[in-house]
Image (tube, helix red, strand yellow):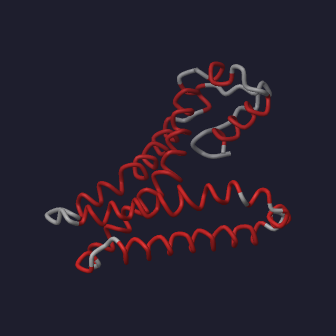
Amino acid sequence: HWRGIRTTSDGTGRMNPSDVSLAGLIALGLAALVCLVGPVLVQARWARGRRWLWVSFGFGILTFAVSQLLTRIPLITRVLPVLPEWRAMLGDALLAAAVLSVSAAVFEETGRLVVMSAFMRRERRTHADGVSFGLGHGGLEAFVLVGLGLAGVLVLGVAVRAGAWDALTAGLPDEGVAALRAQLGG
C-alpha cells in the first residue's frame, strides 16, 4: 500500500476515483518531470555561454543509446532467455543482479571509451565536457528507464481519477486487471 495511491478492499477488482490521491499524482508528476526534462534544464544552465558543451551532451546521449538501448538490452532480452544457465541463475536473484550489473558496466564503459577516444577531440575532454557528457548519458537513462514509466503510471492514475477504470480494463483478462491494480496500488 503506497501512500499516494490506495487500493480498495471492496473485492470487486475496481478502483474508484477516490482511490487515487491528488497528492500522489502531484508527487508522481514532479518525479516524472525531473526525469524527463531535468537533465536538459541542468545542461542548459551548465552550458550557458559555452555552446560547445552541447556537443559533449549529445555524445553522452549517443553513448547510452548505442551501448544500452541498441546493443546490450536487445542482446540480453534475446540471448539470455534461451540459455539454460540463465534460467538456473534466475533462481538466485543476487547472482542474476550481479551478471546484469557487470554486463551494463562493460557495455557502458566500452561505449564511453570508444566515443571519447574516437569522436571527442582532445580539447573536448575537459571537466566541463565530462559533466555535459554525463548529463547527456545519465539524462537519457533517466528519461527512458524512469521518466517514461512514471509518466505512464501518472496517465493511468489520472484516468482512474477521472473515472475511466472500466474503460481502461475493458477487454483485459483478469490477470491484466490485477496487474494494472498492482501497478497503480504499488
Image: 19 above or below 53: above
Quarter of the N terminus within the rendering? top right
* Residue lying at 31% horizontally and 67% vertically, measured from the top left: 132
Residue 123, quarter of picture? bottom left
* Residue lying at 33% horizontally and 60% vertically, measured from the top left: 58
Image: 100 above or below 18: below
Q: Position of residue 90 (x, y in %)?
A: 80, 63
* Residue lying at 84% horizontally and 64% vertically, measured from the top left: 91
Q: Position of residue 110 (x, y in %)?
A: 50, 74
Which residue is nearer to you in this view: 85 or 152? 85
Residue reaching furthest to the left: 49
Quarter of the C terminus within the rendering? top right
Q: Position of residue 8 (x, y in %)?
A: 71, 32
27 left or right of 71 in image: left
The total number of labels drawn is 0
109 left or right of 10 in image: left
Residue 121, quarter of picture? bottom left
172 left or right of 5 in image: right
Q: Position of residue 176 (x, y in %)?
A: 74, 32
Residue 128, quarter of picture? bottom left
Image: 18 above or below 74: above
84 left or right of 171 in image: right
Which residue is nearer to you in this view: 118 or 141? 118
* Residue lying at 57% horizontally and 42% vertically, measured from the top left: 4
